Image (cartoon, grey):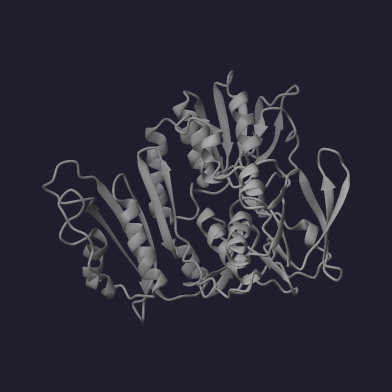
Amino acid sequence: MRYVIIGGVAAGMSAAMEIFRTDSSAEITVLERGEVYSYGQCGLPYVVDGIIPSIDHVIARSVETFREKYKINAKVNTEVTDVDVEQQLVSGIHTETKEPFQVSYDRLLIATGSDPIVPEWEGVQLDGIHTLKTLPDTENIMKDLTDVKQATIVGGGYVGLEMAESFKTLGKEVRLIQRGEQLANIFDTDMAELIHEEASHQGIEVILGESVEGFAGNKRVDTVITDKQSYQTDMVLLAIGIRPNTGFLKETGIHRNKQGAIHVNAYMDTSVKNIYAAGDCATQYHIVKQLDDHIPLGTTSNKQGRIAGANMAGNPLTFKGIVGTSIVKFFDLTLGRAGLTEKEAKQLNLPYKVQTTKANSHAGYYPGRETLHIKILFHKETNQLLGGQVIGQKGVDKRIDVLATALYNQMTVHQLLDLDLAYAPPYNGVWDPVQQMARKV
């Protein structure tokens, strides 16, 4: 059986390893447009600020390891440009030599991930304007930082927040420009206020409600132009979102959503026989919404890749879905969320109620406690938990994982009271903050 995988990072290599373990006679070819396999993209901001001392630390396995130990035909600098679904043939070019190539497959996995969105703004090609998605991106930013005093970040999502901290840690003046009226749109406005306060406390200049229209400078960017005014800068990071890297599939008949994400079923099948998709380029079933969604995260990519590989190799497994769980560090705060926000519940026309609370991260009498801000949504009629947001300095990860597990199991808010959660004064009160809130419902 000839297996071909397009993409050699999270989903692609999770699938390749599952095929290797499942089918002893497999012929596995991986086509990666870059030069590095199997690295942790989520660790890149921490490479920039030096918390992770080297780019090598975020690489899980080298290309040579896949070739020599696992006998995988791991290609590099191979960009796929076309898939012939009738002939079961993948075509592309070697990016270094510009020579074309073709590879035939029995089963194909598309794990091409996503690319940063870069609008066609005037001056966007000037030196000093960056995106952050790959190891070369990271290296370019680090090389460019030497003489930078003022860094401007366009976009207030996770990457924007993480890189604001990274630049500030390196002693740079940092400006965040956000088109909307709040940072971190995946949180509700009342919770986002805590993020704004932390940004102000840390000396981050936050510009809300302005849209970038272009850049100016003599070869190198020195000005950011918005619809309201201009700002002087030494560097720009674009962090306004990502788009599935699926443009080469336009003529294949593979079904994609409006954003370009490939529709898959629970077995990671696409709409075309013998073609699978996984990771940032694919959809994910959202358990709470009961709809296909697109929330690209490394955890999901690895799970979907493993399941795709198993199914390709004849071991049927299903992807059970997501609840939209995520977490990020922003200076002294940890920001966690799972399930639906109020904005999402309204879009889905769900009748809901809200409960909020402030609680101690551990027993109030034990030294070092910090305040947790917790918000939950639950169905107005059934009391089923719909979503949760937690922001604080300590214990956010513990609580958001409890809420994520409850959401996955479609529990009611009252069932949270029955959970047997860990307690000792350095870690918790006798009633966990999540349960304290449930008692008020």
Relative image position of residue 71 (x, y in whole percent): 67, 52
Residue 138, compared with residue 5, is above or below; it is above
Query: In the rendered view of the protein, which quadrant contains the N terminus?
Result: bottom right
Whether residue 47 is visible to the viewer of this picture, yes or no, is yes
Comparing 150 with 290, the one in front is 290
Left or right: residue 218 versus residue 265 is: right
Say which residue appears at 46% left-offset and 66% top-offset.
323
- Numbered disc total: 0
Front residue (pair 140, 278)? 278
In the picture, measured across the screen, residue 327 lies left or right of residue 140, that is left
Q: Is residue 304 above or below residue 216?
A: below
Observer-nearest of 67 and 287: 67
- Residue 90 vertical placement versus 364 (above, below): below
For the question of whether residue 207 can be seen, the reply is: no
Work out whether residue 178 or residue 139 is closer to the camera in this orientation and state it.
Answer: 139
Of all residues, the one furthest to the bottom in this rendering is 381
* Residue 227 quadrant: top right
Residue 187 in the image, given as x and y percentages of width and height: 45, 55
Q: Residue furthest top?
A: 147
Residue drawn at x 81%, y 41% as measured from the top left: 95
Horizontal relation, residue 91 to residue 295: left or right: right
Task: Determine whether 251 is above or below 99 in the image.
Answer: below
Q: Residue furthest right?
A: 99
